[in-house]
Image (cartoon, grey):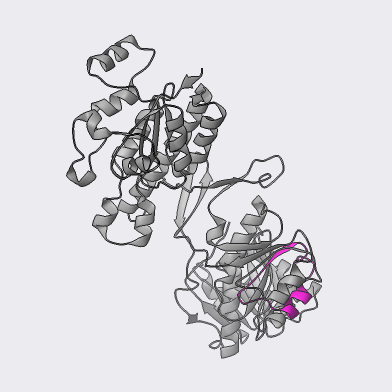
Amino acid sequence: MQKQIKSALISVFYKDNLENIVKKLGEQGVTIYSTGGTQKFIEEQGVKCVAVEDLTAYPSILGGRVKTLHPKVFGGILARRENPQDLEQLKQYEIPEIDLVIVDLYPFEETVKNTTEEQAIIEKIDIGGVSLIRAAGKNFKDVVIVASKDQYGDLEKVLTENNGATSLQDRRNFAAKAFEVCAHYDVAISQYFLNNEPGDYFQVSVPQGQVNRYGENPHQRGVFYGNLNDIFNKLHGKELSFNNLVDVDAACQLIQEFTETTFAVIKHTNVCGIASRATLKEAWDAALAGDKESAFGGVLVCNKTIDKTTAESISEIFFEILIAPGFDAEALTVLQAKKNRILLEQKQPVKSKYMYKNVLNGVLLQDSDNGNYKEWNDVGAHAATAEQKADLEFANIVCKHLKSNAIALVRDKQLIGKGCGQTSRIDALRHAIEKAGQFSFDLKGAVMASDAFFPFDDCVRIAHEQGIAAVIQPGGSVRDNDSIEFCKQHDMAMVMTGMRHFRH
């Protein structure tokens, strides 16, 4: 059912891109009501405007806190046009019908980001605007509601193409977006008062949904909510897929744990190669050597600017994504030779206070896994040497970023074998040893990290047989002493950290 817009109420914080709409409404003979700065803006466009104060016979009061909260405003919005009693009351109280409401709320989130002054933040909690949105959205059968500057373009298109007439579906679509705006706004306010701590309800609102080509598999739908431009400059390549985004997150979470020059290769969220070296090229060579087979089609990440020499070496293999804090001009020329390679310049770390996932009929929420160990408790035959300690710390971080059950084997700050996603810890170790052998690594003098405790001494026994000299694990098993005693008897260092790193 087409309805012609004959009257409009406009009350916005941001006036950007509103000029064309105001002029179009003026050309179409629409009566416009407005307040304060918005009224002044409309009149500056050469368009007539009726002050809301003239409609209500009340001035803006309480420092602007109360402007539109009046029956003559909300009656005109909420009146059901097909209801004779509503229309009779409009006539009785001299309330004009309002067919279009344009609101842009006070910038609450921006204010929270830019100041800690509570009074300034509180004053940016919009009352009248949200009330107008809810009223107009509720009465979408008769009223068009535009609830954000992001929707000005959609309204202008409707006004232009249909000469100011809207369909029921148009009005319903605007209402749906309007209630989304309100919901997001309310969550932001709630989180501010909760100090971003969990409350009685699971509340997360992330704007800017981007539809992926598909989800994890082609038969699944996928959408990413968030603004990647806050984190990356995308310098080259195709759009990031659902799976790309998952792997990119895993890569960024891993690399930010290292300050030394480090290069890593990620495949299906697991680390398949990583090394720290004096130069980026050396780090890349060592990371690739850790598992050349799995690196094919992987996600690459480093914590230093990519130079031409490293870029030329990287370009010898097929990869999907390369993430770095910067790229030399010559390196970019080399890397951009392949059309579909995705090159991401990372601008800031990826940090989240909480992690969550949907399970059963609800949501699980937990703190992010920050920190690597609570304590450094040497319990083996001797304290770890300086070289062993460096490798153990490295291995512990790598193991933290492997799917459980996980084992990481490291020597000279290079991952030389890993077992991940296994149903038993000993299977994870066997897999790690097999991987090391596949690429001809000698495990003599290497170190081993485990994401959780050893339930028996079988893992340290096998490690010793392979020449592994030091172990790091959280401890906590009722049979910890079995593994400790074996290490003491066979001159192995063992460190207990008191911090488990399951990753399911």
User: Looking at the image, is 437 positioned above or below residue 246?
Assistant: below
Q: Residue furthest top?
A: 84
User: At 67% from the left edge and 59% from the top edge, which residue is drawn?
Assistant: 422
Q: Residue furthest front?
A: 46
Please identify the quadrant where the C terminus is shown: bottom right
Instruction: Give the quadrant of residue 91.
Output: top left
User: At 41% from the left edge and 24% from the top edge, which residue is drawn?
Assistant: 6
User: Looking at the image, is 186 positioned above or below residue 498?
Assistant: above
Q: Nearer the viewer, residue 92 or 253?
A: 92
Q: Which residues are magenta?
A: 292-314
User: At 52% from the left edge and 64% from the top edge, which residue is drawn?
Assistant: 350
Decide if residue 377 is in sight here. yes
Instruction: Tell how many labels.
Output: 0
Q: Nearer the viewer, residue 40 or 267?
A: 40
Q: Position of residue 293 (x, y in %)?
A: 80, 67
User: Looking at the image, is 141 positioned above or below residue 480?
Assistant: above
Q: Position of residue 109 (x, y in %)?
A: 38, 53
Decide if residue 405 is in sight here. no
Q: Position of residue 213 (x, y in %)?
A: 68, 45
34 in magenta: no
312 in magenta: yes
